[in-house]
Structures are given as C-alpha cells and as structure tokens.
Image (spheres, helix red, strand yellow):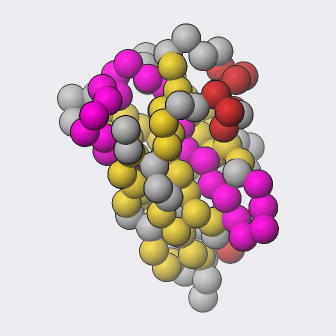
C-alpha cells in the first residue's frame, strides 16, 4: 500500500502551498488521516489530523495557518498551508491510521499504518 503525496516546492515566507495525498489501494473513509513533517536532522512531528467525521486537530505551531481536509469520494486528503514561515521547511508526509485510534494517539507517528513517500516544502526568500 502506498500513499502518494504531492504539492511541495519552494515558496517565500508568507506564501501558501497546498499539499495533496491520494491512495489507490486503501479506502480513506476507513481511516484517520494525518500529516507529519520532518526537518533536516529532526524527528518526525505531528502537523494535523482529520478523522472520518471530519473533526480535526492541529499542532500548536501551525494552528490558524494550516487547514487539513479530506474528500472521501475522491480518496484524497489535503493540507492547505498559509502564512508559511522558514521553520515550516521540512519533508511532509501523509499517513493513515485505524479509525479506532484515539485522538491523543493520532499525534504520534507510531499509530499510523500507511505512509506516503514525502514531499519537500522549502520556505525561503
């Protein structure tokens, strides 16, 4: 099973990017869907998650700037990133976790069964 992430690139501080993630072999409606990121030399960290109901949770560092959304009909999950900062520079990964996973566990990468290959976001002038 592979998730395909796309949409990364180079953007100036204050700019916007929209990441997308799709899968062809699993049904997204059966999973909680999350985004994580990993900066050079850093650990993989939680960014945002959306559950089947559409409820969402965000890391404090991105709340108010990033929006996660899912389209179960299209089997996609997206991350709209606005007001980007240099510290947002990282490889971004989409991931899928079982629906039974409680919210606090969804903040941990260990709770996710399926991962995308990552897409690089660079915020720089």
Q: Which residue is drawn at 67% across and 59% down?
A: 38
Which of the 4 quarters of the picture holds residue 7? Answer: bottom left
In this view, 75 is above or below 32: below
Residue furthest bottom as drawn: 125
In this view, 1 is above or below 52: below
**Is residue 26 highlighted in magenta?**
yes
Q: Residue at x 68, y 74 (%)?
A: 86
Residue furthest top as drawn: 100
Which residues make up the magenta segment? 21-43
In this view, 40 is above or below 92: below
Q: Residue at x 55, y 44 (%)?
A: 35
Residue 97 image position (x, y, % from top left):
52, 26
Residue 36 image position (x, y, % from top left):
61, 47
Residue closer to the observer: 75 or 54: 75
Residue 29 located left or right of residue 50: left
Residue 74 located left or right of residue 6: left
**Is residue 101 highlighted in magenta?**
no
Residue 50 located left or right of residue 102: left
The answer to whether residue 85 of the structure is visible from this angle is: no
In this view, 8 is above or below 79: below
The answer to whether residue 108 of the structure is visible from this angle is: yes
Q: Quadrant of the C terminus?
A: bottom right
Q: Residue at x 55, y 57 (%)?
A: 92
Residue 27 image position (x, y, % from top left):
30, 26
Which of the 4 quarters of the picture holds residue 89? Answer: bottom right
Q: In which quarter of the image is the N terminus?
A: top left
């Amino acid at each position: 099973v592979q998730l395909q992430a796309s949409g990364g690139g180079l953007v100036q501080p204050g700019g916007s990017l929209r990441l997308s993630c799709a899968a062809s072999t699993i049904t997204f409606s059966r999973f909680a869907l999350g985004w994580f990121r990993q900066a050079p030399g850093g650990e993989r960290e939680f960014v945002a998650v959306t559950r089947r109901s559409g409820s969402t949770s965000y890391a404090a560092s991105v709340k108010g700037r990033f929006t996660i959304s899912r389209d179960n009909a299209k089997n996609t999950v997206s991350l709209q990133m606005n007001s980007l900062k240099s510290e947002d520079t990282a490889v971004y990964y989409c991931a899928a976790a079982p629906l039974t996973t409680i919210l606090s566990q969804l903040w941990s990468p260990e709770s996710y069964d399926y991962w995308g290959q990552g897409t690089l976001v660079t915020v720089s002038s």
